Amino acid sequence: MEKKKQRIGLYICHCGGNISDYVNVEEIGKLMQKEDGVLISKDVMFTCADSNQKDMIQDIREKNLDAIVVASCSPKLHLHTFQEVAKRAGLNPSNYVQVNIREQCSWPHSDKPKDATMKAVGLIQAGVKRVAYSESLENIEVEVKSTVLVVGAGISGMRSSIELARLGYEVYLVEKESVVGGHVAELEQVFMSGQNGKKIINDLYEQVKSYSNITLFTNAVMENVSGSIGNFSVDVRIKPREEISGQKEETLTLHAGAVLVATGFDPYQPKEGEYGYGTMPSVVTLPEFNEMIRNNPGKLVHNSRQIRKVSFIYCVGNRQNKGENKYCSRHCCTSTIHTSIQIREKYKDITSFHLYRDIRTYGKQEVLFEKSSRQGDIYIRFDEKEPPQIEQQGKKTLIRVTDYLTEKRELELEADLVVLVTGMEARKDSTDISAKFKIPIGNDKFFNEIHPKLKPVETVIKGVFIGGSCQGPKNITESVQSSLAATAKINALLGSGKIQLAPIIARVNQDACTWCGKCAEVCDYDSLVKTTAANREVALVNRATCAGCGICAPVCPENAIDLAQYTDSEIESMIDGFMMEIDPGEIGKAEAAVEKEVLQMREYPQMWKNILSTLNGGKKTIPEMAEELNEKKELVTYHVMTMNRYGAVVPAGMDEDEEYYYYSIKN
Amino acid sequence: MSKVNPYFAKEMKKLGGTEFNACFNCGTCTATCTLAEKDNAFPRKLIRYSILGLEDDIKSSIEPWLCYYCGDCSDSCPRQADPGNIVMAVRRFLITSYDWTRISGLLFRSLAAYIVAFSLLLLGIIGAYTADIFTKEEWVHYGHYFEMIAIGSVFLVILLPNIIRMWYFTVARKKVKFNIKVYFRELKTLFIHMFSQKRALECDDSKENRTWWLEHLLLVIGYLSLLFTTVFLNWFATGSIFIIVMGYIFSAMIFVVTFDFMMKKFRKKTQRSTTLHYSDWFFIIWLFLMGVSAFAVRLFIDLDLLQNNFWLYLFHLTVLVQWALIIVPFGKWTHFLYRSFAMYFSAILEAPENARK
């Protein structure tokens, strides 16, 4: 254990009044000077100001401080600022502790300045005690392989592989199916470029082939995944291709510095009988309908019947208030309307009914909706409570629907084909992939990022990224955007060949450890493994994968595990510090000081006296006062606002005609 | 249960309703329309019926007749679906549905049919003239008889049954029984409206609208008066200076107002003049020709020129025959009649509870 810090610098922030109006920072500063180990204790108007940062650096160097504490705002705001101050002064940033006396004291307890001050004293004492036991920690450096494993050769995976290859990485592109391209290859025409899906995929495939540093494995399934950021090992089982005789199944072990999971989605498969699916021949899903269009060049024929009226039913298996799939699949409105426009162009004499719940052709896709309705597609809005009923009467397929746009009228329509607009679902094997890579999945079974806005392609597993629709419903553009974002993140991670990891991880005292395995059981990241040290079985922490969550520390029966920066001695000393008795004399003084401050405020400047004399027991608006005092309105406003703030004057109703407040002297 | 008919839109397109499919049901048209009421989302509901092809619901709608096409709905439509235009198309559809002979259906859907019908009548008159059946005096004499017979028979054989059909669709089918007294009491609405067109004033109080109402009213008054003057007072054969002057005034009223209407339609300045069906043009042009030719014929008579310029009378007669046999029973003329009856029927439908039985 490191030496207890004895030369601590403490800086208490006024935050311009945000803190000092309620917490008596000056008195606390004086009080803390007597604290054991504290060399400097100052109150500062703005601790984060450049000038104070310079003073701090000077203090650290001149007085040879070994730890610093700043009592100011939330660490979310300025932890990094002061860690950098420490670094610049040559102090290890781990020897810095931030105490939050603004969000935790002055703001929430502004009605009780005395209690706010007491609480601040407790928190500051805890911070000072903690920093005394702080250790100097260094970042963990890990060497990384410049190889990337891309899982899934759909449009996202292929597009990312090409970019990674261009950046010079060795890429392993692993595809479960025997062909590449995923769902995009199934589309005859994509909005908005109008290109053929298969052609897009073919072009990408040609590019993939042209890079010697991309190795594509098809018919390949992930088996065992081990290792961590910088060096993952993944066993890939490659099934023999049917068309090539004599091929044998083989398993390869691939090593990669980072992994991009782009496994995509499964289209929702309606249940037997859902809207007549599976029981009525004229009911198909949108992907099935798209295939039908691909295969019928001249006339649209289904079950040897020409299709003239198509009825689309939207949101099938999506936006289920009571069901599992509560989300909207984003792409299906656009996709359906685009299909409807395509069939009208391709087959001429064809009409579409759209039985929808809401139309979400967001962004540039809105033009499709307008085009479709202008061309005569009929839109009928239903509610989830009253879904359309489908009935087969001989050869006729009848749909009954309550139209919310026509005063909830019961409508009956005849259709030759009913197309169920099925949305996206997480892949059936997503749980399996999630278990292998330890990527968290949501209730909807899609993979979860760390933060939907700030870390949208990173997972909690360092080095494992997600891209495309395996993360949630996305259209093609959004899928490629996210996988390319992940590509850029991978490049930033692996670019230098080494990575720096934060040092806040679990540490095992191998002398005390008896290897009971409890820590390994609870670890979500598989970071604790059995090893042998001095002929004894003990636990070892994988420094690269440990997330520093601390779950292992409390389960250890031997108390052999500590979490860096949150060691037992640090936490215990914090508790001691917070519980320490505060000299009531000092608090009394502090309280008196607050009182005094208020009294000082009551010693008004000349302007205040003038304002008070014009009010003279009555009430006046600011323009009236300004006129009487022959002063500028802005100046009077400034003073009256300040007087109002300190309780010298109070608002007294409003001049309705002029729309100005009246002010009067507070008794 | 109402059956959706996706092909109805094609029908509407033939009748001049072009862009209504672009409607996305925002209801802005209803919000701007003075005819819309709490339980009656006019014209949004009508557009919805047209899109879905709910013919029965359209047939039982009275509102299209109450609309004077001020164009506010079309101006404010965020999708440029031109709701005002669809109301006009629906009116044409209603004319064809009320007509038991179904001839209006043919004429409103096909410009060729219109032209053929007009040409046949023209050829008939030319044929009769060249065949020399009548003397010039007889032509004028029988021309007058023709007018009387045509008016009587068109009204009895075509218009009256059509009004009964209209009553059946808009009132009887609603299955609300009314005391017969209501029918008599509300007759005043029919006549007040027919001779005042005052509903138009309720649409909006802009200067443009007031001018339009005045012109419209002058046209109605002028037309009805000229009809009375020529048919019952035998304007072309009368010696009464009073009747002669009246005839000049009425016919002038017609052609001055219609000329102004035509100019407005050419300039396309207002909403109601932007989208026009060919039947609208036939109506306005023939009304103009009728006013001008009647005026000219009487002038020629007064100047003693008609005997040597008999072609003028034949021209007037052709216009008259085409007007009386095509435009009046099967063309846009009927909107005058149906609108007045619509006011009457809606007054009956709005009669208080105690008037029902």
Image (cartoon, grey):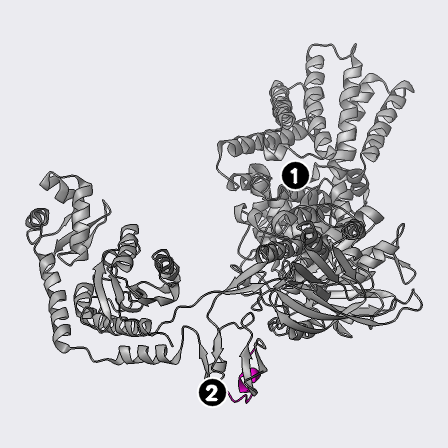
Tell me if residue A497 can be seen.
yes
B182 left or right of A89 in image: right
Task: Provide the residue span drawn in magenta.
Answer: A512-524
Dividing the image into 4 quarters, which one contains the C terminus of chain B? bottom right
| Left or right relative to A521: residue A589 | left
Disc assigned to residue A434: none
Q: Is residue B99 visible?
A: no
Quarter that holds the N terminus of chain B: bottom right
Specify whether residue B156 is painted magenta.
no
Q: Is residue B23 above or below residue B275?
A: below
Residue sitting at x 40%, y 77%: A567
x, y (%) of residue A356?
A: 67, 60
- Residue that sits furthest to the front in the current view: A534
Residue denoted by label 1: B336
Which secondary structure dominates the residues rendered in magenta? loop
Please name the residue shown 77% across and 43% down the image.
Answer: B158
Above-or-below relation of A355 to A376: below
Closest to the camera, between mark 2 and mark 1, is 2
Q: Residues within 10 Å of mark 1 (few under 14, many from 20)?
A: some
Whole-Å distance between the Cαs marked 2 and 1? 105 Å
Taking depth in this image into account, of A603 and A429 the one nearest to the observer is A429
Viewed as shown, does residue B95 lie left or right of A505? right
Q: Residue A112's spot in the image, x, y percent? A: 21, 70
**Chain to which mark 1 belongs:** B
Residue B182, quarter of picture: bottom right
Q: Chain of mark 2?
A: A
When asked about the image quadrant of residue B294, the answer is top right
Mark 2 sits on what residue? A512
Q: Secondary structure at mark 2?
A: loop
Q: Indicate the amino acid at tag 1.
A: Phe
Going 10% across and 46% down the picture, which residue do you hit? A607
